[in-house]
Amino acid sequence: MHDNTYLPDHFLRHIAAIMPAHLSMDEFVASCRRPLRRSIRVNTLKISVAAFVARMQPLGWQLDPVPWCDTGFWLSREDESVPLGNTAEHLSGLFYIQEASSMLPVTALFACEQTRRDGMLLDAAAAPGSKTTQIAALMDNQGMLVANEYSSSRLKVLSANLQRCGVTNVGMTHFDAKVFGQWLPETFDAILLDAPCSGEGTVRKDEDALRNWSIESIDEIAAVQQGLLESAFHALKPGGVLVYSTCTLSLQENQAVCQSLQDKFGDAFSFDSLADLFPAAEKACTPEGYLHVWPQIFDSEGFFVARLRKQHSVPNTMFKPGKLGKFPFSPLPAKESEPMLREIEAAFGVVPQGNLFGRSEEIWLFPQLFEQVQGKLRFDRIGLKLAETFKKGYRLTHEWALAYGDGASKGFVELDIADAREFMMGRDVWPEQEAAGTGEVIVRYQGHTLGMGKWVGSRVKNALPRELVRDNNLFV
Ligand code: SAM
């Protein structure tokens, strides 16, 4: 029980006025004070759900399926001495720690045939990336996903999560998401707007979430949300699908934001009913067909999800192309890219997918559909940095290893648990059970990649990026 959870009276009065008749305020307050159940989502870019369960159950992990996400599980562990984020499986990107109700918006986005995995998708407010990585896994790294985030510090966390999870089809941008309707009208097949919000649904995770709560701040943020939703709607192709979600409960930030779009463009789109999204979804369904997840319904955080389909174009008075600087990349000529790809295949047995681009001393792999948005948007990062070049050759990157290393059929070394810990602590290792090789090597533990190293005699020199080095409390 979280007795210190801050639930001010004026907030509770506000909630009581909008709580549906079949739900109780007492249960609402009790659930807000109850700690959240831990939940994770298996990253199927790296491991199947069956293989993950088979790997973790013997370690004392109990995994109870989340009914609305077939890769999501509530987790309880016999031994919690190692933080979840420091387990070998987390460090090598096999799972993402994600609150169960926050898996709903992406489930809703993909539960219709319009959302194709090889399409052009937008995640308009993406950091830290729980839903971006969920979308990329459902796209199986195909097509292209533009992941936008306004806050610079959060953009860095997003980038780290994409790398850890082996995501290769994302272009990251750093804008107020209001620009998408102006710069890229009718561009995206599907859009997730997981909007910034007042976070009323998050008190179970953060007991101080409501410290600054006021009606005025809700009204202010609702105005921002309306602007973001309208812009995202313009950026959606006719025939496309858009999910609007928040982790808050007030009608102003949820139903009223949807209504504002309806008032403007009501004949150009329709909201889908999400009552059948999963068994028992109707318990959270509103008369309009939205999911308004009160924390006591599924014993989760509070959440709101609405999904709409755009039937036809609307006049876009917003359109105004963005200003772009000089694009610093150029396609790598075939006489450079082909030998490189052949060498990588010969050394590791995997062929990187995508288009190779270069800039100064870097070679990048861009997503398949990148050309559709090339010259229309300034990106912070596109796809995956494959290699850094120097006079006599190139060095493959850590992020390449995290994305492609698990699929390598050669050129890797398997560490035992003691060496794996040493490696994650930034130290060189002398793997006894393997014959020494030469050159760059993918470093794995139980079949999954930790990073890159380089053979120097019988030693594997550690090439883990310094910022990923852990100094204690690692997996045992
Ligand atoms: N989708 C994320 C996830 O699942 O990991 C969570 C997103 S969080 C609810 C909302 C995000 O929107 C925050 O990271 C915030 O920094 C960002 N944000 C705030 N204002 C924004 C704006 N005008 N445009 C784009 N992003 C914005």
Image: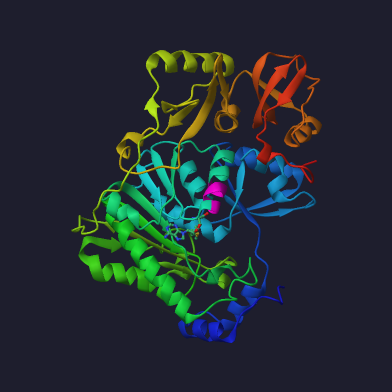
Q: Is residue 128 among the parts visible in the rendering?
A: no
Q: How many marks?
A: 0
Residue 462's x, y, as percent? 71, 28
Q: Judge by depth and name the residue closer to the eye, 26 or 268.
A: 268
Quadrant holding the N terminus:
bottom right
Residue 47's x, y, as percent? 59, 37
Magenta extent: 153-158
Left or right: residue 263 versus residue 409 is left
Query: What secondary structure do most residues of the magenta stretch adopt?
Result: helix
Residue 268's x, y, as percent? 22, 61
Q: Which residue corresponds to the image point at 41% horizontal and 64% vertical from the top-left? A: 275
The answer to whether 202 is drawn above or below residue 6 in the figure is above
The answer to whether 352 is drawn above or below residue 18 in the figure is above
Left or right: residue 157 versus residue 418 is left
The colour style of the image is rainbow
Q: Which residue corresponds to the image point at 55% horizontal and 47% vertical from the top-left? A: 156
Q: Judge by depth and name the residue closer to the eye, 164 or 463.
A: 463
Quadrant holding the C terminus:
top right
Left or right: residue 175 versus residue 435 is left
Q: Which residue corresponds to the image point at 45% horizontal and 80% vertical from the top-left? A: 216
